[in-house]
Amino acid sequence: MSKDLAKATLQRIEALAQISEDAGRLTRTFASPAMRRANELVGSWMGEAGMSVRTDAIGNLIGHYPAATPDGKILLLGSHLDTVRDAGKFDGPLGVLVALAVVQHLHETKTRLPFAVEVVGFADEEGVRYQSTYLGSRALAGTFDSDDLKRTDAKGIAMADAIRDFGGNPDGIASAKLDPSRLLGYAEVHIEQGPVLEQKNLAVGVVTAIAGQARARINFIGEAGHAGTVPMKLRRDALCAAAEFVLAAEALAQNRGGLVATVGEIAALPGATNVIPGEARLSLDVRHPDDAAREQAMAELKQRAEEIAAARGVFMKWETAHQNHAVICERRFTTLLENAVKRHQPEAPLLASGAGHDAAALAAICPVTMLFVRCKGGISHNPAESATEADVAVAIAVLNDFLAQLAKPA
Ligand code: GLV
Ligand code: MN
Ligand code: MN
């Protein structure tokens, strides 16, 4: 069954990858016109798979496949439809489309389960546009922070206006919250985004935990000046302060087990060859499987930023944009998923996720589980991201078996 569905899934991944806000590369950020087109296309596939389709107040796309009886609970499946800039095709869409394939199979075989299945295409997992991640899954979990609506993107567009332009309702986000008492749980399929499965020569693996993460926006503010006339000793160069901070973050993470720290964005203002940078803006992303270790690292990095600024006579502004604690996947679901995996490959490896996933937000309201799929070279957040049709077929079969086990009386 899963071979044809895997082929169709990869064709759909190709079709979705054509929907971008940038010419010549895949970029699909929260509440963009490209996201709307992606929702329309995936929504049409959901309809063909026997689901009723809705879009909630923040822009999550949700397909509902009914239970055998009206009192059945709901199993959520899915992943995100937004992407990073110059993204690969699989991070996010794979989880939505594998879930869709499984529901399509239920529909084609006229199978109803004791629970309804809802496939969600989350509106924002990457947090590219507003730096705050999981906007979609936090809306469903009821943990969306309405202060986030005031955040502005790089063009100065407030999140509330972006949601309105998209066709959503920023004032109605509380209504997107799902009723936890109706939920059986959430299962997400995702590419591994790392090399372990490839090293083990296995198609899929079971996720045990998702690392916590924190993001900050940091500004160093010095004084712009003439590049030809201001002597080196009299400068207050904001970009040099930022450069020192980037290396301090790297050094801290290199010397501390389990810690990763990344400055992924940097801007020098006003930005001209012959002007000493008066301001530098940076992003910081810090992760550790242990929450206390991550918090400690953030505190130390803030301290370092303050020291660097003081030594250079510049100001420093630190804004924590986002924090998420580490999440453990649910034990019973993990066992069911392991059993399903072992039916399709010799062993079921257990993996921890260093990447963030919508499952981390949904863990606030229901049990969560995740299946990782091998990706070539472990490469992700890169257009070279890829997974094979054979591995996608295994993921579809495993998810289908997981649903079948869950449908059995306990
Ligand atoms: C999402 O891909 C993240 O982990 O940042
Ligand atoms: Mn990602
Ligand atoms: Mn992802």
Image: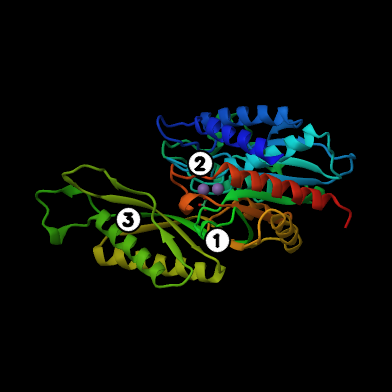
Dot in front, 1 or 3: 1
Q: Based on the displayed image, in which of its 4 quarters is residue 310 positioned?
A: bottom left
Disc on the earlier residue, 1 or 3:
1
The residue pinned by badge 3 equals 220
In this orientation, does residue 275 appear?
yes
Up/down of 52 relative to 251, above or below: above
Dot in front, 2 or 3: 2
> For residue 83, which numbered disc appears in the image?
2
As helix, strand or loop, the secondary structure at mark 1 comes to helix
Q: Amino acid at mark 3?
A: Phe
Query: Mark 2 near ligand 2 (CB under 8 Å)?
Result: yes
Gap in angstroms between the C-alphas marked 1 and 3 = 45 Å
Q: Amino acid at mark 2?
A: Thr
Disc on the earlier residue, 2 or 1:
2
Quadrant in which the N terminus appears: top right
Gap in angstroms between the C-alphas marked 2 and 3 = 28 Å
Could you say where residue 404 lies in the image, as x and y percent from the top left? 80, 48
> For residue 200, which numbered disc appears in the image?
1
Could you say where residue 234 lies in the image, as x and y percent from the top left? 15, 59
